[in-house]
Image (cartoon, rainbow, N blue to C red):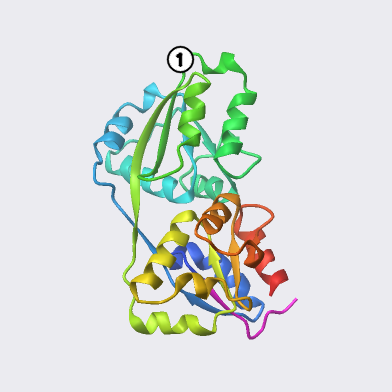
Amino acid sequence: MSIAGKTIVLTRTPRQSASIADALIAKGAQIIVFPTIQLIAPPDTNIIKQAICELDNYEWIIFTSANAVDHFFQYVHAAEQSDISAKTAVVGPATAEALKQQGMYPDLLAQQYQAEGLVQAFQDMGDAAAKLERILIPRALEAREILPEELARLGYEVTIAPVYQTVCTQVATEDLAQLDNANGIVFTSPSTVRHFIGILEAAGMDALGYLNQHQRRVFSIGPVTTDELVHSRINPANIVQADEATATSLTDAIITAL
């Protein structure tokens, strides 16, 4: 199936958008890389630095994104820490692949590629598994709290260690002009939704009017991102959600819908 002549906006960073961009270009699409987010160090790095010094005290390390893996290991390498005995759990195949790039293989891969899937996986282990076990969650500074809250309810001792924070990028006027002819806008996280809307509104544009135009489809990687779109008053009829929260499934949804 060809999508030749279609223009698609990707709202992640160029590196994170690469696999989707390559697949869509191969189908004939024109790609606009319009990064809405930038990843920087969290305001307080003491928590993660202390956690790395005490890695032997953790039974599990949970990663909910490839970004969390990448930034966590930056701190690990900076501390010259190479011995990680804790088991690892990841939220999806992209996160698993990022972990493999660091020479580790996940002990647990959630069947449902979001936080709820990890909660279910740990719940399936039974209460006996939770006895005095400590879990480290390196993650974004701002993230959904369902995972640490539910794991704590199951009896685990949870440490949240911010390893990066997401901030809005600065966009030039000429970059905004590229958006006029877009047939589809792709969102891969709630933060990309919020920052995209914020960027357009800061430039004096009608962000909701732009995203709700019937000829322009809004693509979501999964239910969490879709919830943010709906919360932001994007017409659900204009939203196309990937069957699975993966880059491959999202790419397939774009090709099919356009």
- Residue 64 versus residue 238: which sits nearer the camera? 238
Look at 61% across and 80% down and name the residue there.
29
Q: Which residue is mark 1?
A: 132
Q: Is residue 109 visible?
A: no
> For numbered disc 1, what is the local secondary structure?
loop
Judged left or right of residue 160, residue 120 is right
Percent across and percent down for residue 154 are 53, 21
Judged left or right of residue 137, residue 115 is right
Mark 1 neighbour density, 10 Å: few (under 14) some (14–19) many (20 or more) = few
Identity of the amino acid at label 1? Leu
In the rendered image, the quadrant that contains the N terminus is bottom right
Give the answer, above or below, for where 185 lies relative to 77: below
Percent across and percent down for residue 238 are 63, 67
Give the answer, above or below, for where 6 lies relative to 77: below
Q: Is residue 173 visible?
A: yes
Give the answer, above or below, for where 136 lies relative to 38: above
Q: Main secondary structure of the magenta part?
A: loop
Judged left or right of residue 124, residue 151 is left
Percent across and percent down for residue 53 are 29, 29
Look at 50% across and 34% down and name the residue there.
147
Judged left or right of residue 33, residue 8 is right
Residue 4 belongs to magenta span: yes
Look at 28% across and 50% down and name the residue there.
41
How many numbered marks appear? 1
Percent across and percent down for residue 103 are 48, 43
Tell me where the magenta segment starts and ends, as one range. Answer: 1-9
Look at 36% across and 28% down and name the residue there.
55
In the rendered image, the quadrant that contains the C terminus is bottom right
